[in-house]
Amino acid sequence: MSWWKSLLPKRASDAQMNSELRFHIEELTEANIAAGMPPEEARRRAVLEFGGHEQLKEELRDVYRVRILDATVANLKSALRFIRKSPTFSATVILTLALAIGANSAVFSAIDAILLKPLSFPQSDQLMRLQQRHPKLSNPNAFVAPVRLEEWNRLNSTFQALTGYYTEDVSETSGALPEKFSESFVAPRFLQVWGVAPALGRDFTFEESRFGGPQAVIISDRFWRRRFAADPNAVGKKLRVGNFSPAIVGIMPASFLFPERDVDLWSPVPLDAPYAQKRESTWFTVIGRLKPGVPIDQARANLATVQDQLAQQFPKTDGDLSVAIEQLKETTIASSRRSLWLLFGSVSLLLLIACTNIVALLLARATQRQHEISVRFSMGAPRGALIAQLLTETFLLALFGALVGLLLANAASGIFRSLAARLPRVEEIHLDARIVLYSLACSVVVTLLCGLFPAIRGTRRNLSGSLNQTSRTQVSGRNPLQWLLVGIQVALAVTLLSGAGLLLRSFQELGRVSPGFDPSHILTFQISLSWGETADLKKLRQKTDRILEALRATPGVEAAAISVGVPGVPFKYQTELKLLEGRAESEPKLLADSHLVSASYFATMKIPMQEGALCRETDGPLAVVVNRSFANAYFTNSPAIGHHLDGSNLGYSGPAEIVGISGDAREAGLDQPPSPTVYWCAPIAEPGTYFLVRTRNAPMTMAETIRQQIYEIDPQRSVYDFAPLEQHFSDALAEGRLRTILLTFFAATALSLACIGLYGTLSYSVNVRQREVGLRLALGALRGQIIRQFLWQGLAVCIVGCVAGWALATASGRLLAGLLYGVSPTDIPTLASVVLLVLAVAAIASLIPATRAARVEPMQVLRNE
Amino acid sequence: MPIEKSDLLQGTLDMLILKIVALGPVHGYGISLRIRQISKEVLQVQQGSLYPALHRLEKRGWLEAEWGASEKGRQAKFYKLSAKGRKQLESEESNWNRLAAAVANIMQTAQ
């Protein structure tokens, strides 16, 4: 293969041209002299015969001039003509590509915005999330005590600054009605760490972050526009949040995308307050900004040293603690990475299928154009030029495809945002220059993938060697290459369908799961509460009790309870517990999820008590209920009831007696098997506590009544986040559902593409072999035989494709393993039904051309001969 | 009557050049001379066609060029056939023969 050499320019220098031409003239002159002319006359005649010297040189230069621009324009023109001349073919290719590139660009826009782009803060790669880790706690939200945050900030040498925040829902009452907002309480150096200044107003002052100092709040751009209609004079006005009246000192720019996207208010929390001095408290999500150029490992080592120092100083509280440092971006997006790459993998497969399809179309096309290509060859066109022309045609088609695809992607990104509202950074998904570039790159790759092979094959010399139309009388329409392509498409489609099928089966399995409680007719909501109230637990308990009593008294309500976290929604709070009675070293550690609930929880959720009694809500000694898994896992020899747990890990003082054993419930998510769980009966409503109400009728119909009821007891509080419990399940599964919907959509598209490919190839084969069919029918073949033969030709390829696809799906099943529930990645029934589906659809796609083949009129065909 | 280039089938000149060059390294003047001699003065190739064709064939890799001394000791550019050119010549020759035979056939049969 050296056709490419002809693409490389070779050059003859001007001097060489001159001397070559001069030689010719001199030889002519000599010949003339030899013929008897006088020298002067001989030379004159020679020059005359030779013609315009300069003009000839110009023509020679033309031979070498690489006229890229001219050639490209000419190629584009002829490509446009080609597209216009064959609108059906072009539309098919463009639409196929539009779908494939559009889907690809849409998923890429999500990947780009969520995974690839840095967070939207200045030098965001310097931003780190710091956590305190305790070897006995597996709580992912390892919040940091305020004093420790200050010590870390003071003692480290690798961070520019550390800050922290915690968020709670507040009731803002300066408007007409109490309104619920999310407010973040922030440690000093907050804006310094983010590297963002308020768009209007100023940062907090030192006094404002002191205990007893003036109260200040910075508000979000969103809040400012809604509440103050973007009035610049809003700075200085006062809000009314709970019992405080902070003055607005600043307004953040709209581009400030705080990790907790609901937050509208930021207020300083005084770290010198007496209640902030406990080393055991867990308050802050800590964010730090590294010094420029400091690698993360150095920061880790540095903080480890700092924490060692603290451990020596405070062995009781800090002895076991270590510091975990992670890129902030990493902690934000880690959960969605797998889903997104899975989707990207599947749209790439889709693009591959589309390309294969187009290769088949182009190959068929090239056969039809053989004559045109032969003519061009005999006119002296170099092969490189022909390949360039064919590639230009493909490129133009790909480009149109990409443009339509971009429009689709733009529409799809809206769908993405509404389907996946829970994805991190989803609001940052936009169609921008990078996506356009990506689509263009896609079309170039597509051009090379789809165009190169047919172009090289279509311009082979032996194909174009003759102008005569031997193909007209050729009987064979077997083109193994096109059938190979169909097989590949089927295999890839089977792979995608298997993935989609497995995800669908998981969803089905999830629907069948019995959660261990009755989620129907449960209304959940929250009430604005503050951490400050938890200072007086006794009073808070009375308040909580009063609310629960009022709820129970409401007509239409059967039961009411509270729970930190919603049952059935992922919320892990696993701790190691100790038995006062002691345990042998050989026995497993007592690891259990802790749930803080009111005693009425079991009745409300209809979780059966299997042994013992309900826990008591008294000020006396604590009593807890454990679930069946806990009892079975840790108390094989002795009854669990009667043992005492040490709850000091959780901030409870004193031993807690196990008084009852409840049935297992899937508290941590429907897709999580029940784990050992301890229910601490603490009727204390903290921020984040959910109220659960069992209603007689449809849950949401009770919302207004309940809001009214609570307003009567405590007009200061806002009630919000009303939702049926089943809605929470559905939200918790939103990402999985998005994944499933998209993958199913891609797989369906892949299957239709593969069928179009099969149909097209078989139709082509039928067309080419019409003569043969006609002949055979004339000789007495039955139409049924013809149909069977073509049907089998299509199906045989599909069967091979399915086998390959099965193998591919099994091999790639491991990618899905963590995303499945209740089915194995190589689930035979799923794979088998996918194969059956594909074969059924393939049979339909083959049947149409096959019956058409059998309808051939023998006389018609033979007459055409 | 001599046949000028414009009457020559496009591509035929290339084939003629390749055929001449196949006999051995030769310069442009020699090629034009031989075409005239062998065709018994029927074909006369203009320099304006010959040299662009030569350079085109060289660029395409069918001819290789080398500077050397002519019989009279002048510096001249000699062309010779490359391996690729030889293949090309073979295929063009067989095409030509088939075409010529077909045309001759028609002319004879239709008489």
Image (cartoon, coloured by chain):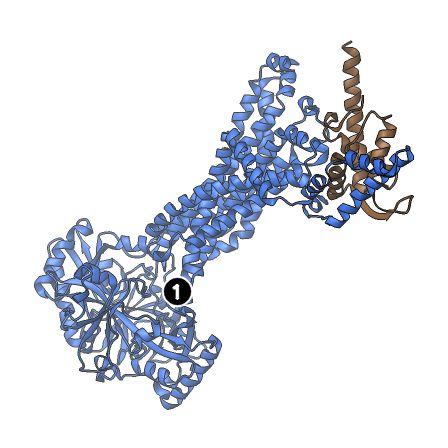
Of the 4 image quadrants, the one containing the N terminus of chain A is: top right
Chain A: drawing colour:
blue
Residue occupying the far left of the picture = A712
| Vertical side of A762 occupied by A666: above or below | below
The residue labelled by disc 1 is A119
In the image, is residue B4 above or below residue A384?
A: above
Q: Residues within 10 Å of mark 1 (few under 14, many from 20)?
A: many
Residue A142 appears at what percent x and percent y?
35, 73
Query: Farthest residue toward the top?
Result: B111
Q: Is residue B21 something one can see in this rendering?
A: no
Quick one: A221 or A727, which is closer to the camera? A221
Q: Quadrant of residue A38?
A: top right
Residue A822 left/right relative to A532? right
In the foreground, A73 or A263: A73
Furthest toward the bottom, the residue is: A313
Classify the position of the C terminus of chain A by image quarter.
top right
Number of numbered markers? 1
Palette colour of chain B:
brown
Residue A363 in the image, given as x and y percentages of width and height: 61, 35
- Nearer to me, A612 or A490: A490
Left or right of A205 in this view: B23:
right
Residue in the picture at 45% in, 60% down: A116
Spot occupied by residue B18 in the image (x, y as percentages of width and height): 81, 36
On the image, which quarter does residue A569 sit in?
bottom left
Label 1's element?
Answer: loop
Residue depicted at 66% across the width and 14% down the height: A779
Residue type beneath disc 1: Leu
Question: x, y percentage for residue A64?
Answer: 69, 44
Viewer can see residue A310? yes
Chain name for mark 1: A
The one of A106 and A434 positioned closer to us in this rendering: A434
